Structure formats: structure tokens, C-alpha cells
Amino acid sequence: MRSHTEAGLGFAVAGVMALCGCNTNPWDKTGPSITAPTISAVSPSIGSTEGGTYVTVDGDQLKPGFTATLDGVPLTITPHTNGKVFKSFSFTAPAHAAGRADLAVRDSDGQFSPEYGVKKYTWASPDTFDFNGGWNAFVPNGNPNPFTFTVECDVLLEVTCYDGTPLL
């Protein structure tokens, strides 16, 4: 229980603080409310098991000094600032076995992003990114006539209509 003096001082301090537009209880020892960092988008969310994919993460409450991990491994991050507030960061994904992984952010206050435990990044075999070869495709309006395209050395070389007319 507070003494009369403490209660009087609290009333006086609270009164002055209210006049200044502050509604904080001067006897509250819990400190300010701390908001955990959040992750809203990961782009791209998939990369090669060989590593090297440049990934950008959008979020909020990314305070100076925050850190990030991918599958529990600390990342070297590049924060992107908008004034004094960090809204995104980038990193280069390391090599890793195929599979999904947690992307977690921890702020300088020790709070983890609430998404921790949610898989946010996937490593896939480099073969899944190989589009070289000849492909058949269909136009989106439901036309059953296909067109073809050819990719070599990761470059689109040829696109042909169903009737053989080259488009590229």
C-alpha cells in the first residue's frame, strides 16, 4: 500500500503529465509496451539448395539492432530504412538441403516475430528452376490450340502460334 505522501506525489506527477498530454501512470513499473517485430512478405520465398538467392523481407517493428535467422542459422542482413524506421531487409540465402524453413526476426529487446514456427522460405533442387527446352502452352481464353516456345541457356528464343506463325 502506498503512503499518503507517495499517493500525493503520484497525483501531482500524474496531473502534470496529463497537462502535458501524457497519460502514463508514474507508478507503473512494467515499462513501455513493447511490440514484437512482424514479417509480412518474403520475396522470393523459394530458392536453390545451392544458395545465393537474394531475398527481400517486408515487415514492421524492425528496430535498430534486430537480427534474423533462417532455419535457426543467423543471417547477414541488409536493413532498408525509410527515414528512421526499418520496413524491410535483405539477405542472401545460404546453401541448404531441400525443404521448408522458419524465417524469424528477433529485435534488440529479445522479442521474436510472432510468425516464428511458420515456414516462410523453401529450398528446392536447382533442377526445379531449369526451364530450358521446348514447351507447349495454351492461351488463357480457353482456346484449345497451343502455342510453343523454346528456351535455351535460360533465354527465350522462340515463340510460335498454333498455326506455325512465329511470334518471336
Image (cartoon, helix red, strand yellow):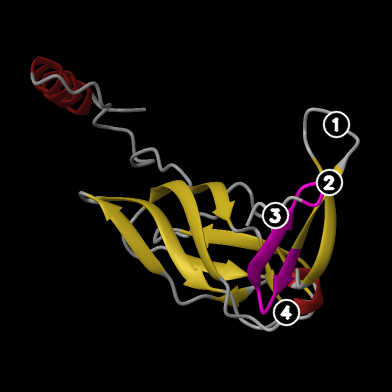
Q: Nearer the viewer, residue 123 or 40?
A: 123
The answer to the question of whether label 2 and label 4 lie on touching residues, with beta carbons closer than 8 A, is no
Q: Look at mark 4 in the image and give the residue it sits on.
A: 49
Relative to 74, say whether 33 is above or below. above
In the rendered structure, which amino acid carries the disc numbered 3? Pro
In the rendered structure, which amino acid carries the disc numbered 4? Thr
Crowding at dot 2, Cα within 10 Å, few <14 / some 14-19 / many 20+, comes out as some
Relative to 151, say whether 138 is above or below. above
Helix or strand or loop: what does disc 2 sit on?
A: loop
Helix or strand or loop: what does disc 1 sit on?
A: loop
Mark 1 or mark 2, earlier in chain: 1
Mark 4 or mark 1, earlier in chain: 4
The answer to the question of whether label 4 and label 1 lie on touching residues, with beta carbons closer than 8 A, is no
Q: Look at mark 2 in the image and give the residue it sits on.
A: 162
Q: Quadrant of the C terminus?
A: bottom right
Relative to 34, say whether 98 is above or below. below
Mark 4 or mark 3, earlier in chain: 4
Q: How far apart are the alpha carbons under marks 2 and 4?
A: 37 Å
Q: How far apart are the alpha carbons under marks 1 and 2?
A: 10 Å
Q: Look at mark 3 in the image and give the residue it sits on.
A: 166
Mark 3 or mark 1, earlier in chain: 1
Disc 1 versus disc 2: nearer the observer: 2
Helix or strand or loop: what does disc 3 sit on?
A: loop
Disc 3 versus disc 1: nearer the observer: 3
Q: Nearer the viewer, residue 112 or 94?
A: 94
Q: How far apart are the alpha carbons under marks 3 and 2?
A: 9 Å
Q: Is residue 123 visible?
A: no
Q: Look at mark 1 in the image and give the residue it sits on.
A: 143
Q: Quadrant of residue 80?
A: bottom left
Disc 2 versus disc 4: nearer the observer: 2
